[in-house]
Image (tube, grey):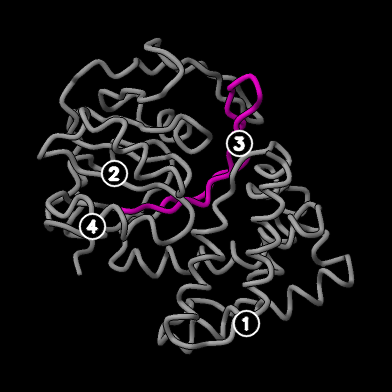
Amino acid sequence: MFGMDNFSSTPRSINLGILGMGAIGRLMAWHCQTATHCYALHNHSAEDCSFNVRSDKSVEQVTIPHWNGEPLDVLFVCVKAQQTLAALEQWQAAITDNTQIVLLQNGLGQQQEVAQHYPKHTIFAASSTEGANRTQSGDLNYAGKGETLWGHFSGPGASLHLPLSNLGGSHKAVHNIHQVLLDKLAINAVINPLTVKYDCPNGELLTIPAAFQELQQLVQEVESVITQAEQKLSYPLQQKAEQVCSTTAANISSMLQDIRAGRNTEINYITGYLCEMAKAHHIGHELNHSLLNYVVNAQQANH
């Protein structure tokens, strides 16, 4: 297991590609723009990617040039989990033998798929608690400061070519990125599918009696699956779920946003991952299985 030794604090200029210019891609582009050569890998055209970053205090314009064959030291993958392998295949020309891959995504499972397809590449994963969403016009609403945690996931144990000191915002290297990803997966598995089922903002999971009862049952099942699979969370899940629902009470979860917009969700890499873990260890997971089917059916109904 590699950890903090894989990260440098000495600023240096590199070529960085960002694959997927949604909310997280634009957030990272904004954080990276001043300290590195940053390029956008997006499907719309060969034009530069321009957008505004809107926060409580200011509006800042950001322009990221389109990738045009420059050799990339690091490639940030910011597409949805289910799009990962297809997106990497589409942009295969941007990945040299020396390109490091950083997965900035929700869910679990796609990291292992990338590790299998790119065994000779150093692969990192990162998880962010920053609040950001993309508007219909393409602007980025920066809703709140958070922290991005970084760790080595697989492949050769080289240092990340991009020093974290190059980035705006708050960043920290961790020894066990899998634990970070599992912690985030568990909270997403409790909140996201329930907001789809009850078609409500996060906070209403605490105020709708049936939703809160199901949340409590789901917490018990998720904890049971993780514990019986001989893993553990870094926090009490019930307490964490209530805290997140309270602090993000007015937020519409990304999964519910996807359903309302007629897009596929990341359900297979969140609840689906837990179901596969449960099946592999012969653990009961009826509620997760039911919610997986509910969200999949909702996706199909909206297409």
Q: Amino acid at mark 1?
A: Glu
Alpha-carbon distance for marks 4 and 3? Answer: 31 Å
Q: Amino acid at mark 2?
A: Leu
Q: Describe residue 248's horizontal placement relative to residue 74 as left or right.
A: right
The residue mark sitting in front, 4 or 1, is: 4
Q: Describe residue 111's horizontal placement relative to residue 99 as left or right.
A: right
Density class for disc 2 (Cα within 10 Å; few <14, some 14-19, many ≥20) is many
Q: Amino acid at mark 3?
A: Asn
Residue range (magenta): 125-148
Which of disc 1 and disc 3 is earlier in sequence?
3
Density class for disc 1 (Cα within 10 Å; few <14, some 14-19, many ≥20) is many
Task: Pick whichever, 26 or 22, lies toward us.
Answer: 22
Which of disc 2 and disc 1 is earlier in sequence?
2
SS for dot 4 = helix
Q: Describe residue 61's horizontal placement relative to residue 239 as left or right.
A: left
Question: Which residue position holds label 1?
Answer: 221
SS for dot 1 = helix
Density class for disc 4 (Cα within 10 Å; few <14, some 14-19, many ≥20) is few
Give the image quarter of residue 11: top left
Which of disc 3 and disc 4 is earlier in sequence?
4
Is residue 18 shown in magenta? no
Discs 2, 3 touching: Cβ within 8 Å: no
Question: Which residue position holds label 4?
Answer: 116
Q: Residue at x 42, y 22 (%)?
A: 43
The residue mark sitting in front, 2 or 3, is: 3
Alpha-carbon distance for marks 3 and 1? Answer: 30 Å
Q: Residue at x 38, y 55 (%)?
A: 110
Reply above or below: 262 against 58: below
Question: Which residue position holds label 2?
Answer: 164
Question: Which residue position holds label 3?
Answer: 133
The residue mark sitting in front, 2 or 4, is: 4
